[in-house]
Amino acid sequence: MIKSLTIPCKASSFYFKKVEGPHALRSRKVRMELTITQPDDWHLHLRDGVLLEAVAPNSARHFKRAIVMPNLKPPITTTAAAVAYQESILKALPADSDFTPLMTLYLTDTTSPNEIKLARKSGIVFAVKLYPAGATTNSQDGVTDLFGKCLPVLEEMVQHNMPLLVHGEVTDPEVDVFDREKVFINTILRPLVEKLPQLKVVMEHITTLDAVRFVESCTEGYIAATVTPQHLLLNRNALFQGGLQPHNYCLPVLKREIHRQAIVSAVTSGSKRFFLGTDSAPHERQRKECPCGCAGIYNAPVALSLYTKVFEEANALDKLEAFTSFNGPDFYGLPRNKSKIKLIKTPWKVPESYAFASGEIIPMFAGQTLEWLPSIVA
Ligand code: DOR
Ligand code: ZN
């Protein structure tokens, strides 16, 4: 018979479970489990068509809700398009899935304030995404005049308490690619926060010590940041280890080790300003492994294992649940999930690839063995 032992930790809904029994006795090993509130993914690319069908079930397996990025071709610029996109996402899910896609609008120089009214009224749009034109994948229709043409829309967003999600990089080719986030903070983000202090802003996928310091310097509840597994676990060496590594290429690009360490410290500190956003961004293998490869790392199947690893290595497992499951909904003013997920400390192998109708997708850490296997508590 297996005997289980539960050891309470600081957070009430969080515990280690040691399972003892004949197997444990033989191997003299103790199995560890964590049970936490089911997380949401506050930054996710689900794509459309056959790619959507391939990836949506993998996110829905672990996450209860996700903020879905609007950078499709053509981009999701209207509430009507967001409604249609949400329907196609729901169709791509398994019949028994209760995953909720939270939709976003793609901000352009011609977005009208009325579109924000419609978005809020719809009840399905939860944020507006700012891509500086040319900053990343499908951003060619993005913003060129934030403080001019977009100002009336931003003011309308304040009225409706609608968050602005920011891809925080300048696009000036003269600016070194590793400095683009820092320059964006100084030239765009800080002035924006000073001009519209009531605007809720999420700085997406932060990559630098500069971003950590900026977010920490702002008013809590108005400015927050999402953090990806890759920016917590990899530094820029991972792009060149043993040769060019296209599957580690994303934007904003990986940075120096000091920046990675600053981000780890920020998320494991227990601050409410930082929350989980995978930026899982699948591209078909051929579009990554080619002369001009796309930016984006497909991490949805491994993200929860990897975040848990980061918190474990920082001796901060008691802070994991707030990062994965509380800080995000609290910032967005949404209820925390009631459902639970279990993280079991057992080795499991990441698939080498995920095949789909028109090719394959290579996940982050393909073929490697990870610890912490997620499993939904029925
Ligand atoms: O690496 C990235 N991939 N960064 C982004 O900002 C966009 C994303 C994508 O859509 O592929
Ligand atoms: Zn993204």
Image: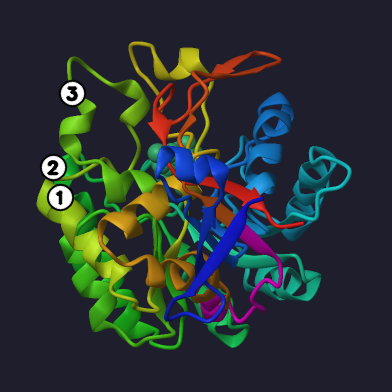
* Residue 152 visible in the current orientation: no
* Mark 1 neighbour class, 10 Å CA radius: few under 14, some 14 to 19, many 20 or more: some
Judging from the image, what secondary structure is the residue with disc 2 in?
Answer: loop
Could you give the CA–CA distance between mark 1 and mark 2, rounded to whole angstroms?
A: 5 Å
Q: Nearer the viewer, mark 3 or mark 2?
A: 3
Place residue 184 in its image quadrant.
bottom left
| Three-letter code, disc 2 | Asp
Relative depth, front residue between 362 and 142: 362
- Picture residue at 71% right of the left edge, 66% below the top: 339
> Mark 1 or mark 3: which comes first in sequence?
1
- Residue under circle 2? 176
Instruction: Determine if the magenta segment contains residue 335.
Output: yes
| Above or below for 261 versus 59 | below
- Picture residue at 19% right of the left edge, 67% below the top: 186
Relative depth, front residue between 1 and 81: 1
Relative depth, front residue between 108 and 90: 90
Percent across and percent down for residue 308 are 41, 54
Does the residue tagged 2 have its C-beta within 8 Å of any atom of ligand 1?
A: no
Judging from the image, what secondary structure is the residue with disc 1 in?
Answer: helix
Percent across and percent down for residue 294 are 41, 26
Quadrant including the C terminus: bottom right
Stretch in magenta: 330-341
- Residue under circle 3? 240
* Mark 3 neighbour class, 10 Å CA radius: few under 14, some 14 to 19, many 20 or more: few
* Mark 2 neighbour class, 10 Å CA radius: few under 14, some 14 to 19, many 20 or more: few
> Mark 3 or mark 2: which comes first in sequence?
2
Q: Which label sits on residue 179?
A: 1
Asked if the residue at tag 2 contacts the one at tag 1, i.e. Cβ–Cβ closer than 8 Å, the answer is yes
Q: Is residue 80 left or right of residue 282?
A: right
